[in-house]
Image (cartoon, coloured by chain):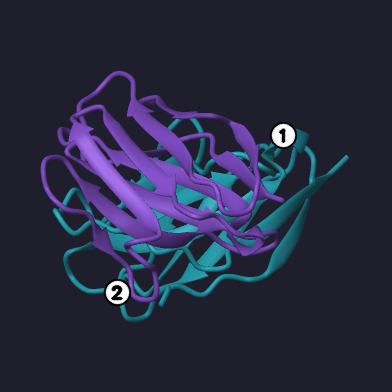
């Protein structure tokens, strides 16, 4: 299957700082990428849909000013957690949709810990 | 909200077939059934998807009932490495609004 990468795989930051997470589709161009968050022992929760060249679409209850999404190219979407707080500590996972086949492939996830 | 219902957990003996059920009674005509699995602390892995016909690939088989209200994922010879949370999801294949909404999934524990 297609490969989606994330960077970094884990990050620890101090409360009040901002953290940027990258999601790349390595062998296909993705016009649409998705960002999920997963708390321990819970399922994945969709945060937003990232569209290349346009604004992201956020799910209800997700603060767009706190979770900034940029999809500047067909292979890269970034999620910036601004002014991070300990409650933002979570596992952040992206996925990319292959426009040819339609399948979605997931990245390995980024573990964010805010101290 | 997720449109599927799955058992919370299941056990399976190593080497035996694992049959994971999923109910999706409100599925609409153009929605596909997807199966993904997530091994601890990793991103979900695509397994298989189907519309109405049964499907098979190198990982698993997907059996969809004629009324499409339920399906079963079959791992023919489960191994310890198949221990994971398995998610059954319905959605529009390849559509511009193809959001995958995850439910709680089934934790499959393969026992030696």
Query: In the image, what residue occupies the spot 77% across and 36% down?
Result: B80
What is the letter of the purple chain? A
Tell me if I can see residue B85 in this picture: yes
Q: Are marks 1 and 2 on the same chain?
A: yes
Q: Nearer the viewer, residue B83 or A12?
A: A12
Q: Element at badge 1?
A: helix
The furthest residue to the left:
A53
Foreground residue among B110 and A113: A113
| Residue B58 horizontal/vertical position (percent) | 47, 29
Asked if labels 2 and 1 touch by Cβ distance under 8 angstroms, the answer is no
Q: Is residue B63 above or below residue A12?
A: below
Q: Which residue is mark 1?
A: B81
Q: Report the Cα–Cα distance between label 1 and label 2.
A: 31 Å
Helix, strand or loop under label 2:
loop
Q: B100 left or right of B97?
A: right
What shade has chain B been given? Answer: cyan
Q: Tell me where residue A74 appears, x and y as whole percent.
A: 18, 29
Badge 2: how crowded within 10 Å, few (<14), some, or many (20+)? Answer: some
* Quadrant of residue B19 within the rendered picture: bottom right
The numbered mark 2 sits on a residue in which chain?
A: B
Q: Earlier in the sequence, mark 1 or mark 2?
A: 2
Query: Which residue is the site of mark 2?
Result: B27
Residue at 45% across / 52% down in the picture?
A82
Q: Is residue B100 visible?
A: no
Residue B74 placement, left or right of B88: right
Question: From the viewer's perspective, is B77 left or right of B1?
Answer: right
Q: Position of residue A67 (x, y in %)?
A: 39, 56
Residue appearing at x 40%, y 24% in the figure: A3
Q: Nearer the viewer, residue A52 or A30?
A: A52
């Amino acid at each position: 299957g297609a490969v989606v990468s994330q960077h970094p795989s884990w990050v620890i930051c101090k409360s009040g700082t901002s953290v940027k997470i990258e999601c790349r589709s390595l062998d296909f161009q993705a016009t649409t990428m998705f960002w999920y968050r997963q708390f321990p022992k819970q399922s994945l929760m969709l945060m937003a849909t990232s569209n290349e060249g346009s604004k992201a679409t956020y799910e209800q209850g997700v603060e767009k000013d706190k979770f900034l999404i940029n999809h500047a190219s067909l292979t890269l979407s970034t999620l910036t957690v601004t002014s991070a707080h300990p409650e933002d500590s979570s596992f952040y996972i992206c996925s990319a949709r292959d426009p040819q086949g339609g399948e979605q492939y997931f990245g390995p996830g980024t573990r964010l810990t805010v101290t | 909200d997720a449109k599927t219902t799955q058992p919370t957990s299941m056990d399976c003996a190593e080497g035996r077939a694992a049959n994971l059920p999923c109910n999706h009674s409100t599925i609409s005509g153009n929605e596909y059934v997807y199966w993904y699995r997530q091994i601890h602390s990793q991103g979900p892995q695509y397994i298989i998807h189907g519309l109405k016909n049964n499907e098979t690939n190198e990982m698993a088989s997907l059996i969809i009932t004629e009324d499409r209200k339920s399906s079963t994922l079959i791992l023919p010879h489960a191994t310890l490495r198949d221990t994971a949370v398995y998610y059954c999801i319905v959605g529009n294949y390849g559509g511009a609004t193809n959001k995958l909404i995850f439910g709680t999934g089934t934790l499959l524990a393969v026992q030696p």
